[in-house]
Image: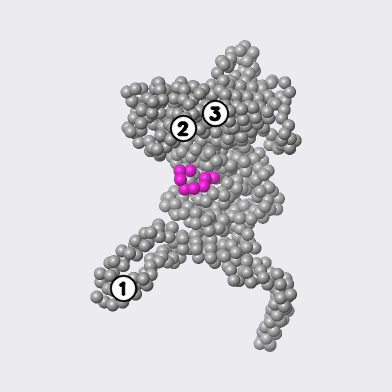
């Protein structure tokens, strides 16, 4: 009995979504707005940009300082191992309330 | 405790927790003022501070005041207020946008004179006394000393003068004019005007249009009604000169003489 | 009696600090508390205008500090509510006219007589800000769902956290447009609270009546049935300890089609 109900519900659901899409096709202005929203989501942009800028603000490291730290790290590590300088990735990551400095350093070969 | 730094020529700088006053009233010329100022700056750490300067009765031109201002700016010092008894200096300072006072400066001054403006508003005994004083002429103030200014006064600007003030221009909301004598404005009065500030009940305030937030004469106070008078707001082009004075213990605005 | 000293701050200008101070203050007083509001924006005061009290100011905060008048003389009573008073900022001076120590002293005196001392903070993080937060033990941070405002709020939170006297601070999200949030074109309420990791005190929807209330010099909480007014009233009641749920601005209201769907589903499963 329950199974039948679920099937029925699904059918109704499908039917309604079909009606909605047809309606949207007819009311072409409506679809335009929807398309705009799905292709360009300015809220997520804002969220991501904000998170990044706040991480830098909170760590009180300027982009210049980050670059300097990166250069110095490369110098120190290069004394021990040969690394791929261009592929070195250094960034700040936030987890809940703490900020971590994450470095990804591909080693080419041991010296 | 105030700390005082004096130079041998009689210039001094007093430091209190709230303010710094540089007293140059005994210095006779502009050149010496520059010299003394640099002396004081060298001997004390005024960088990034706001200072008040007393020029005494020395006459300074607008050029002199603005060059002083830029010299001080070079040391990262800004002028907060200027005290002067010279009308030329006052006008010059006003024109470069400085706050000017005619009173003798005192660090942390306490004035008891205008202690309770609002309370005395309804204090009939005091009013009767005051009116009697007016009749007896005991609060007579010398009225020859008139400060004449040709510019608009904007929000945040304050003009104080011992005598009458005449302004050719508007006084915008947020500005303040305080005179011991009369205040006459060839324009619209929108800020606060205080005439007869040392207790002259016969002082008057005149303007093309009195639209002031508050009017004060001696220790009386009148304020703009809470409801906006649309009638007055609409007629932008029609001016009827108005005069405010004390009648029967109240400040009354008259539109006809 | 020892009242609570709450500073209203934001970092960025124009996000609604003064409007919020006026309305939260008035709302607290409407709920029976004794409230005094201090405008610490010396040189650029506006709280008096929003309260419609600009023509009653004789003495200012600076006159009190310079001992030109007594504290009681400088307090301007509200037109409607005798429980509400304003201590205005001086217009013809600048921020350096007051010091944090002096503000602490004034707040200390005021909280003897009032349940709430609401301090309206100037924009920025310089001396004016330091003065405003000096005497406070609680803070309300105002921000809007815009990147610049959120970033500045984060800076303010950092500064407040480093100050031991501030025991608790909460966020008010102002000028929220539910429709833009629902279409994912505006930072949502949870987005902002997550990014700032701060507790939410209330959400104020964008409301044109705010402009009307400012024009009239009458806080919006005194107007009947406005969205923003209700939100401010709820904030005041939350401050006074009541538990009032913050309405959900994020999920869109059910559309007609949703309703039809739900109806069918409900009948099908019964």
Task: Point out which mark residue B159 bears.
Answer: 3
Q: Label 1 near label 2: C-beta < 8 Å? A: no
Frontmost residue, B127 versus C96: C96
Q: Quadrant of the N terminus of chain B?
A: top left
Q: Quadrant of the C terminus of chain B?
A: top right
Q: Residue at x 34, y 61 (%)?
A: A68
Q: Residue at x 53, y 42 (%)?
A: C41
For residue B193, above or below residue C100 = above
Q: Label 3 near label 2: C-beta < 8 Å? A: no
Q: Residues within 10 Å of mark 3 (few under 14, many from 20)?
A: many
Q: Which residues are magenta?
A: C119-128
Frontmost residue, C36 versus B8: B8
Residue of label 1: A83
Alpha carbon distance from label 2 to label 3: 18 Å
Based on the displayed image, in which of its 4 quarters is residue B169 positioned?
Answer: top right
Mark closer to the observer (2, 3):
2
Residue C130: x and y in percent read: 46, 45
Structure colour scheme: one colour
């Amino acid at each position: 009995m329950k199974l039948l109900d679920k099937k029925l519900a699904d059918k109704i659901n499908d039917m309604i979504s079909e009606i909605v899409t047809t309606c949207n096709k007819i009311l072409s202005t409506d679809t335009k707005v929807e398309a705009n929203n799905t292709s360009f989501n300015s809220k997520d942009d804002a969220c991501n940009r904000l998170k990044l800028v706040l991480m830098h603000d909170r760590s009180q490291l300027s982009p210049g300082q980050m670059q300097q730290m990166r250069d110095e790290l490369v110098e120190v590590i290069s004394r021990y191992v040969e690394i791929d300088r261009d592929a070195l990735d250094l960034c700040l990551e936030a987890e809940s309330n703490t900020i971590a400095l994450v470095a990804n350093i591909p080693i080419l070969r041991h010296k | 405790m105030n700390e005082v730094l004096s130079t041998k020529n009689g210039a001094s700088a007093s430091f209190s927790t709230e303010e710094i006053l540089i007293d140059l009233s005994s210095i006779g010329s502009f050149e010496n003022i520059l010299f003394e100022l640099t002396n004081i700056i060298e001997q004390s750490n005024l960088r990034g501070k706001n200072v008040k300067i007393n020029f005494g009765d020395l006459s300074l031109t607008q050029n002199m005041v603005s060059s002083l201002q830029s010299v001080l700016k070079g040391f990262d010092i800004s002028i907060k207020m200027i005290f002067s008894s010279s009308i030329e200096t006052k006008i010059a300072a006003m024109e470069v946008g400085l706050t000017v006072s005619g009173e003798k400066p005192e660090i942390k001054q306490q004035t008891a004179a205008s202690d309770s403006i609002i309370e005395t508003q309804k204090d009939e005994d005091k009013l009767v006394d005051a009116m009697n004083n007016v009749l007896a002429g005991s609060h007579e103030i010398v009225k020859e000393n008139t400060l004449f200014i040709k510019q608009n006064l904007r929000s945040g600007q304050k003009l104080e003068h011992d005598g009458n003030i005449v302004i050719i221009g508007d006084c915008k909301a947020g500005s303040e004019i305080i005179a011991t004598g009369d205040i006459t404005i060839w324009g619209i009065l929108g800020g606060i005007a205080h005439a007869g500030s040392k207790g002259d009940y016969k002082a008057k305030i005149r303007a093309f249009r009195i639209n002031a937030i508050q009017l004060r004469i001696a220790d009386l106070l009148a304020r703009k009604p809470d409801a906006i008078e649309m009638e007055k707001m609409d007629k932008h082009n029609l001016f009827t000169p108005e005069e405010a004075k004390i009648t029967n213990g109240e400040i009354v605005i008259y539109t006809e003489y | 009696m020892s009242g609570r000293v709450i500073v209203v701050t934001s970092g960025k200008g124009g996000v609604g600090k003064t409007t919020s101070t006026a309305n939260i203050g008035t709302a607290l007083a409407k709920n029976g508390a004794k409230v005094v509001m201090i405008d610490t924006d010396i040189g650029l005061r506006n709280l008096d205008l929003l309260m419609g009290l600009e023509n009653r100011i004789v003495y200012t905060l600076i006159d009190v500090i310079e001992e030109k008048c007594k504290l009681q003389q400088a307090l301007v009573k509200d037109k409607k509510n005798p429980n509400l008073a304003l201590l205005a900022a001086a217009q013809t001076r600048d921020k350096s006219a007051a010091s944090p120590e002096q503000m602490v002293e004034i707040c200390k005196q005021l909280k003897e007589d009032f349940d709430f001392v609401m301090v309206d903070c100037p924009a920025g993080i310089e001396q004016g800000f330091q003065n405003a937060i000096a005497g406070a033990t609680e803070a309300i941070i105002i921000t809007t769902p815009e990147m610049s405002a959120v970033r500045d709020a984060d800076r303010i939170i950092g500064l407040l956290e480093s100050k031991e006297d501030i025991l608790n601070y909460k966020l008010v999200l102002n000028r929220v447009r539910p429709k833009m949030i629902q279409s994912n074109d505006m930072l949502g309420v949870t987005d902002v609270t997550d990014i700032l990791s701060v507790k939410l005190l209330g959400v104020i929807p964008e409301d044109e009546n705010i402009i009307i209330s400012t024009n009239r010099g009458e806080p919006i909480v005194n107007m009947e049935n406005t969205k923003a007014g209700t939100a401010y009233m709820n904030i005041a009641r939350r401050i006074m300890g009541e538990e009032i749920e913050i309405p959900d601005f994020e999920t869109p209201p059910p559309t007609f089609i949703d309703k039809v769907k739900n109806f069918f589903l409900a009948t099908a499963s019964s």
